[in-house]
């Protein structure tokens, strides 16, 4: 899914004509390090793109995404993987994340809209490498059973994910402490879905129960991991069910799907056996034969090397966990942060603060020569998933993800000066560039003359009441204008804005 998102959206976001071209980003990094691709530059932005020809960045981004898609699809369909394939996947996605800028929040990059699933996917993928044999491609490799060190690595990951999320809430917004956060969450989360529309109208006592249950799952249940086999399995069951509830009630990309993965490490072969067919010669039968066999071959050199690697891996995870644990214990805890450029061990958290009102930026265009003419007709551009048209049903896209829609949510409670890319987007829509238009759901100027002006309008959005007057008119949302978000702009007026940032001036297709 991550590579699919990258293939569909990277060219438009960070490609040659992207909103934040990654070529320009890498050139600035290179310039900062005295024009050299040295160890410092590689540490700041670890990516294989440093070593490729930048003359066609769009093709590079596509090739990386397609290769990742092919390999990950092979692993998913066949159920076979080895260290080499998993390492290639990890390097490919690390390379994309570290040039993604605000869209993926790479190491040391200041991101208000930080998305923890990028780091979490990289950490999970890194752990996944060591579950696999070096070369063998088999659903059940006989000579390389998973090391308990790796299994505990996954358990340590889910422990940090959940405890970090719980602590950031308790230390953050007071509504988590007075049990009122869920009164707002469904309506104000970044990209609501249709279930959230109805969940928002749950009675107050139910929202309080939800908040208490959230605290129990994130602050108490993680410690079950260390309380023996049965309690560890209880932890796994509760965490998986909790993630399923989050999937149903929101569009948080592949975050919740991904969080289920380390929870599986809370179970053992016996407890997972019911998932597999008892047919003769099947995986279940072969596992039982392996476990009951008294004729195990003596460990060879490869086995000893692997044992050393696993122990070294465990020591590495322990060392890299030190700043993460310090952060968890700190009253100034930060969430979704990497303390190393390779994203091997990270700190996590979500919704430390809850917005109490939903605001949206609506982009509007007009063909009128005078944007201040009261008779000017302003038409709205619709995004793929974020709220806009009051009658459009909220989307259900998880585990897929629209990066632009997600960042538009953060932009709505900041200013356009803090999000210069939104002016870049306006310029591309003025030019009717195909790349930018592909990020939108509708183009009101399709088949017409391009707009002469585009402006950003700021609105307050609220869910309509199910069964109420607005809902009877087919409206999922009601809105009230706050004021202008950014003033009307035209292509000529943006020329210097583009030149100052070394962005290519939009050309009308």
Image (spheres, rainbow, N blue to C red):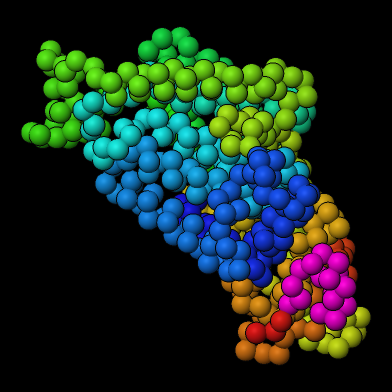
Q: Residue at x 14, y 28 (%)?
A: 285
Q: x, y percentage for residue 496? A: 88, 73
Q: Is residue 473 visible?
A: no
Q: Residue at x 69, y 18 (%)?
A: 326
In this picture, residue 12 sits left or right of residue 112: left
Q: Quick check: 334 above or below 46?
A: above
Most extreme residue toward the left is 280
Quadrant in which residue 229 is drawn: top left
Between residue 434 and residue 443, name the one nearer to us.
434
In this picture, residue 356 sits left or right of residue 348: right
Q: Quick check: 270 above or below 494?
A: above
In this picture, residue 447 sits left or right of residue 362: left
Quadrant in which residue 164 is drawn: top right
Quadrant assignment for the C terminus: bottom right
Q: x, y percentage for residue 153? A: 47, 23
Q: Quick check: 43 above or below 394?
A: above
Q: Quick check: 500 above or below 228?
A: below
Between residue 201 and residue 288, name the one nearer to us.
288
Q: Residue at x 77, y 20 (%)?
A: 331
Q: Residue at x 57, y 63 (%)?
A: 53
Between residue 211 and residue 85, name the one nearer to us.
85
The segment highlighted magenta reads: 491-506
Q: Is residue 376 visible?
A: yes
Most extreme residue toward the top is 227
In this picture, residue 85 sits left or right of residue 59: left
User: Is 200 included in the stretch rendered in magenta?
Assistant: no
Q: x, y percentage for residue 431? A: 72, 80
Q: x, y percentage for residue 102? A: 70, 51
Quadrant in which residue 364 is drawn: bottom right
């Amino acid at each position: 899914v991550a590579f699919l998102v990258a293939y569909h959206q990277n060219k438009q976001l960070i490609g040659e004509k992207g909103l934040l071209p990654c070529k320009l980003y890498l050139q600035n990094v290179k310039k900062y390090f005295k024009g050299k691709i040295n160890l410092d530059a590689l540490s700041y932005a670890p990516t294989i793109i440093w070593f490729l020809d930048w003359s066609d960045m769009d093709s590079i981004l596509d090739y990386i995404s397609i290769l990742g898609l092919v390999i990950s699809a092979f692993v998913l369909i066949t159920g076979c993987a080895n260290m080499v394939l998993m390492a290639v996947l990890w390097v490919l996605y690390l390379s994309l994340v570290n040039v993604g800028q605000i869209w993926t929040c790479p190491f040391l990059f200041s991101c208000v809209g930080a998305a923890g699933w990028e780091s979490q996917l990289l950490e999970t993928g890194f752990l996944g490498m060591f579950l696999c044999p070096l070369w063998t491609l088999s659903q059940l490799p006989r000579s390389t059973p998973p090391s308990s060190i790796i299994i505990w690595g996954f358990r340590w990951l889910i422990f940090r994910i959940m405890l970090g999320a719980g602590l950031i809430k308790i230390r953050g917004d007071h509504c988590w402490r007075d049990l009122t956060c869920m009164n707002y969450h469904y309506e104000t989360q970044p990209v609501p879905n249709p279930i959230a529309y109805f969940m928002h109208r749950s009675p107050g006592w139910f929202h309080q129960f939800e908040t208490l249950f959230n605290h129990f799952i994130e602050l108490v249940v993680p410690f079950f991991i260390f309380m023996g086999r049965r309690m560890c399995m209880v932890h796994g069951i509760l965490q998986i069910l909790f993630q399923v509830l989050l999937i149903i009630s929101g569009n948080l990309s592949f975050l919740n799907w991904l969080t289920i993965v380390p929870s599986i490490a809370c179970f053992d072969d016996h407890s997972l056996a019911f998932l597999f067919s008892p047919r003769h010669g099947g995986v279940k039968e072969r596992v039982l034969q392996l476990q009951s066999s008294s004729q195990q071959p003596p460990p060879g050199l490869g086995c000893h090397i692997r044992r050393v690697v696993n122990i070294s891996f465990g020591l590495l995870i322990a060392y890299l966990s030190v700043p993460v644990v310090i952060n968890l214990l700190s009253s100034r805890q930060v969430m979704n942060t990497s303390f190393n450029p390779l994203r091997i061990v990270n700190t996590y958290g979500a919704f430390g603060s809850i917005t109490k009102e939903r605001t949206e930026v609506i982009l509007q265009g007009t063909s009128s020569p005078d944007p201040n003419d009261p008779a000017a007709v302003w038409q709205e551009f619709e995004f793929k998933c974020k709220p806009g048209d009051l009658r459009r049903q909220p989307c259900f896209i998880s585990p897929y993800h629209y990066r632009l829609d997600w960042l538009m949510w953060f932009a709505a409670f900041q200013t356009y000066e803090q999000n210069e890319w939104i002016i870049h987007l306006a310029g591309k829509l003025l030019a009717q560039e195909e790349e930018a238009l592909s990020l939108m759901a509708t183009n009101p100027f399709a088949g017409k003359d391009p707009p002469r002006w585009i402006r950003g309008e700021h609105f307050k959005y609220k869910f309509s009441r199910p069964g109420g007057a607005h809902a009877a008119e087919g409206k999922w949302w009601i809105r009230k204008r706050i004021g202008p978000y950014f003033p009307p702009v035209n292509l000529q007026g943006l020329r210097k804005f583009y030149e100052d940032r070394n962005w290519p001036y939009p050309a009308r297709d």
